[in-house]
Image (cartoon, helix red, strand yellow):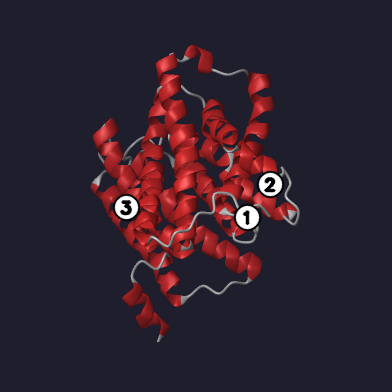
Amino acid sequence: MVKAFSFNDGNDGGGYALAALAVFIWAAWLPATRVAVADGITPLDLCLLRYGIPALLLAPVWWRLGLMPKGLPPLVFLAMMGWGAPFVYLISTGLSRASVAHASTLVPCMMPLIAAFGSWIIYGERIARQRLVGMGFIAIAALCVLASVLSGAGTADLGTLGILLLAATGWASYSVAYRRSGLTAMQAAALVFIWSTIIIAPFILLTGSGLPDIPLSRIAFHGTAQGIFSGFIATIAYGLAINRLGMSRAASFSVLVPVLATILAFFWIGERPSALDTVALAIGTIGVAIVNGVFPRYNELHKR
C-alpha cells in the first residue's frame, strides 16, 4: 500500500513537538465544538466541516489508496468508521448539554478502557496487570462523573452521558481496527474523512444545511478549527510523530488531552469544573497515563 507522508529523520525532539502539537489541537477541539454548538451549528453541519475540509486537503492520499483498499477487511473498515461522522455527531450532540470537563473525562479517558476490553473480547488479547490498574482508575473517574451528574451539577443528564460513552466506543472501535488495517495513520484518517463526507452528503441534501444562516466569519472560524486544524494539521502532525517516535510513545501524549481541554475551556468559555469533576479528571488522567505506559518504573515493577 502507498505510504503517505512517511518522513522519518530520527529526530525525537521533532517527534515530541509534533505529538504535542496534535494533542494540543485535539484538546482545543472539545471547547471549540462547544462554541460551535452555542453558535447554532447543527451536528450534521459540524460533521461536514470536520470531515469535508480535510477530505479535500488529503485527496491525494485517499485517491492513490482507493476508496476500498485491497486487503482491508470489511468489518475492520466498518469499525474504523466509528471515529468518523458518528463520532463527531455524538460528541457535538453531547456537548449541547455536557460540560467540557464531563466530555473530557468520559471520552478521551474511557476510550482506552473500552478499546482494551474490545481487544480482549474480540481478539483474545491479554490485558496486562498494570493496564488493569489504570483501567480501574478510569472506571472510578467515570463513577465520579456519574455522581456529579446525579447530584445536579451542570446541565448534563444520564442520556447525555450515554451519548458521550457511545462516542468513546466509536473512537475505541477505530483504535482497535486501525492496528489491524495495514494502513498508515495518514491513510486511515484520509479514508475515514472521505467516507464520512460521502455518508454526510445525502443527509445534508435531504434535510438542508443551516450554515447559510450562520455569519460568514463564524463559518470561517469553525471551518478552520474543525477542518483545517483538528482534521488536517493535527492528523499530519500525529502521523509524522508516529513515524518518528513509534505508536506507543506518540500515543502516550494523549494523557494530556483531558486536562488541557478543561483548562482551555476555563480560559476560553469560562467553564468552571466542580470539585468532584476536578477529582474525576485527575483520577481519569492518572488512569490513562498508566494504561499508556507513561510511568515506566511502575510498569517494570509489575512485570517482575
Residue 223 visible somewhere in the drawing? yes
Residue at 58% in and 19% down: 209
CA distance for labels 1 and 3 = 33 Å
CA distance separating discs 3 and 2: 39 Å
- Residue 183 circle label: 1
Seen at 72% across and 50% down, the residue is 69
Measured in 3D between alpha carbons, the distance from the residue under mark 2 to the one under mark 1, in whole angstroms, is 9 Å
Left or right: residue 106 versus residue 3 is: left
Is residue 295 left or right of 129 when viewed as pictured? left
283 vs 203, nearest the viewer: 203
Residue pointed to by mark 2: 65
- Circle 1: residue type: Leu
Sequence-wise, the earlier of marks 2 and 1 is 2
Hey, which quadrant is residue 62 in on the image? Answer: top right
Mark 1 Cα within 10 Å, few/some/many (few <14, many 20+)?
some
Amino acid type shown at disc 2: Leu
Q: Nearer the viewer, residue 248 or 111?
A: 248
Marks 3/2 in contact by CB < 8 Å: the verdict is no
| Image coords of residue 206 (percent x, y) | 68, 20
| Disc 3 packing (10 Å; few <14; some 14–19; many ≥20) | many
| The quarter of the displayed image where residue 300 is located | bottom left
